[in-house]
């Protein structure tokens, strides 16, 4: 009997504690519902196939380039290059005598470590003019000459230049306007039109800074 009375009292207490009049409700902020992170859309990327160009390995320029050019053809090719790359003098020099006599000592104004030989204003001002100069014929690159290298002194071999950095300050490349000539060890006088500026001879591959297109060639005694 006492046990039953205890159970009933406990039930009444629990009902009273849970009644709305006695309850102190505390509002609790609900935890935010987890939002599904936006799905990162990866756009398909189409990779273009690499455009490959068939490139042949660079081959060294053979020397001589060709020995079968027609007489005067190499000179014509060099002249076209000369015309495209005509240098400009720092100060124009005028001349009263024609053809203008010039020596190797008048070609350059010194040497620059970055640019090489410094062309003199006199030499550049003579570009395309008639000149006369003396020197020696270097040993030829082929038996019959339609060109040769004019040098200050006699040489045992022909100086061949593969770049302007190789170009000595005491030579000039001479193209013969009419026909060919034979080599000589005597001093010679060359008269003709002078052309200034870097150029590559189409037949030999020789790079030159000074060229003379000779009208006449005289052997000196």
Image (cartoon, rainbow, N blue to C red):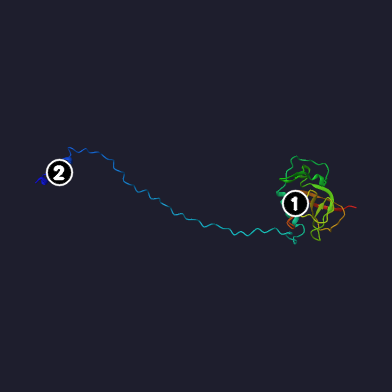
Instruction: Where is residue 173? Give x, y as percent.
Output: 78, 52
Q: Residue furthest left?
A: 1
Whether label 2 touches label 1, CB < 8 Å: no
Q: Nearer the viewer, residue 2 or 199?
A: 2
Q: How many marks?
A: 2
| Residue 92, placed above or below residue 51 | above
Query: Residue 3's spot in the image, x, y percent?
Result: 11, 46
Q: What residue sits right under mark 2 in the picture?
A: 10
Which is closer to the viewer, label 2 or label 1? Answer: 2
Observer-nearest residue: 137 or 69? 137
Q: Is residue 85 left or right of residue 156?
A: left
> Where 160 falls versus 94 (above or below)?
below
Please indicate, yes or no, whether residue 119 appears anywhere in the rendered image. no
Residue 12 appears left or right of 90? left
The residue shown at (81%, 44%) is 106
Dot 2 or dot 1: first in sequence order is: 2
> Does dot 2 land on a helix, a strand or a loop?
helix
Q: Considering depth in this image, is 163 or 128 the residue closer to the camera?
A: 163
Instruction: Name the mark on residue 166.
Output: 1
Q: What is the number of the mark on residue 50? A: none
Q: Crowding near pointer 1: few (<14 within 10 Å), some, many (20+)?
A: few
Q: Position of residue 12 (x, y in %)?
A: 13, 42
Q: Position of residue 11 (x, y in %)?
A: 14, 44
Q: Quadrant of residue 52?
A: bottom right
């Amino acid at each position: 009997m006492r046990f039953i009375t205890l159970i009933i009292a406990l039930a009444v207490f629990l009902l009273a504690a849970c009644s709305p009049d006695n309850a102190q409700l505390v509002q609790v902020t609900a935890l935010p519902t987890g939002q599904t992170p936006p799905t990162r859309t990866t756009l398909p990327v189409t990779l273009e196939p690499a455009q490959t160009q068939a490139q042949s390995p660079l081959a060294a320029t053979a020397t001589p380039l060709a020995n079968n050019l027609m007489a005067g053809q190499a000179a014509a090719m060099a002249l076209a290059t000369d015309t495209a790359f005509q240098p400009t003098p720092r100060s124009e020099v005028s001349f009263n005598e024609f053809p203008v006599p010039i020596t190797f000592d008048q070609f350059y104004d010194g040497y620059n470590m970055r640019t090489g030989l410094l062309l003199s204003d006199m030499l550049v001002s003579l570009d395309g003019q008639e000149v006369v100069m003396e020197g020696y014929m270097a040993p030829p690159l082929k038996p019959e000459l339609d060109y040769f290298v004019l040098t200050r002194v006699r040489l045992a071999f022909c100086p061949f230049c593969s770049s302007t950095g190789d170009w000595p300050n005491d030579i000039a490349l001479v193209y013969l306007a009419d026909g060919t000539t034979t080599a000589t060890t005597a001093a010679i006088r060359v008269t003709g039109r002078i052309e200034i500026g870097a150029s590559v001879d189409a037949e030999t591959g020789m790079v030159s800074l000074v060229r003379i297109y000779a009208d006449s060639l005289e052997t000196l005694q």
